[in-house]
């Protein structure tokens, strides 16, 4: 009986994640539309903002963060550069690579959305305090790591 209850809990958890993913995707589409860009382009801007520590960030780092192909990042960052949301400069360490960073225009647009984003976060996470979010994030990080391992095992036939 306990195994059946565990299976039910896991199934419920997975469906909750599917629902949360769908809702967050819709939210990202809305943010993107406000800036006149696509959802993947919005996610690229967020990833650059998250990863850049002042020297720009590589396209490969962005691709890894978003779990997408680097060629797609290259294609989309070129478009975002033309729209003046990103700056792409040759890396001082290795001329074969570009360092990507947000432009002032992108920073301003993201800042302009910050009040709406804070209100949205309050709606989504209002029932959780900082400690609860920290606890939840630790558990989700563990599940993400374990799910990558399970996926690898499945792909090589170990499961």
Image (cartoon, helix red, strand yellow):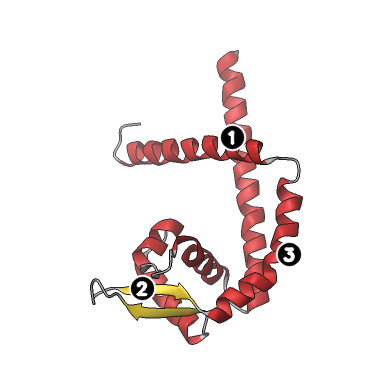
User: Which element type, helix, strand or loop, lies under badge 3?
Assistant: helix
Residue furthest toward the front?
A: 54
17, above or below 34, in the image: above
Q: Position of residue 74 (x, y in %)?
A: 38, 74
Count every numbered label the image shows and give the total.
Answer: 3
Q: Is residue 121 left or right of residue 155?
A: right
Choose top left, top right, bottom left or bottom right for residue 26.
bottom right
Choose top left, top right, bottom left or bottom right for residue 59.
bottom left
Name the residue: 41% across, 61% down. Answer: 68
Mark 3–mark 2 Cα distance, whole angstroms, equals 29 Å
Disc number placed over residue 113 in the picture, else none: none
Depth order, front residue of 40/99: 99
Name the residue: 70% across, 40% down. Answer: 129
Residue beneath disc 2: 99
Disc number placed over residue 135 in the picture, else none: 1
Q: Position of residue 32 (x, y in %)?
A: 62, 71
Q: Quadrant of the C terminus?
A: top left
Q: Quadrant of the N terminus?
A: top right
Say which label, 1 or 2, has the lower sequence index. 2
Mark 3–mark 1 Cα distance, whole angstroms, equals 25 Å
């Amino acid at each position: 009986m306990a195994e059946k209850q565990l299976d039910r809990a896991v199934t419920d958890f997975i469906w909750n994640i599917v629902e949360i993913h769908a809702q967050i995707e819709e939210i990202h589409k809305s943010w993107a539309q406000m800036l006149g860009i696509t959802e993947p382009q919005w996610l690229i801007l967020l990833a650059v903002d998250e990863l850049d520590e002042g020297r720009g960030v590589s396209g490969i780092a962005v691709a890894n963060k978003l779990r997408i192909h680097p060629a797609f990042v290259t294609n989309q960052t070129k478009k975002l550069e033309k729209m003046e949301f990103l700056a792409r400069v040759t890396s001082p360490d290795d001329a074969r690579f570009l360092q990507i960073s947000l432009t002032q225009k992108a920073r301003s647009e993201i800042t302009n959305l910050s009040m709406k984003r804070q209100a949205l976060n309050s709606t989504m996470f209002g029932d959780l305090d900082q400690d609860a979010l920290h606890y939840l994030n630790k558990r989700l990080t563990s599940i993400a790591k374990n799910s990558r391992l399970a996926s690898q095992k499945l792909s090589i036939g170990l499961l």
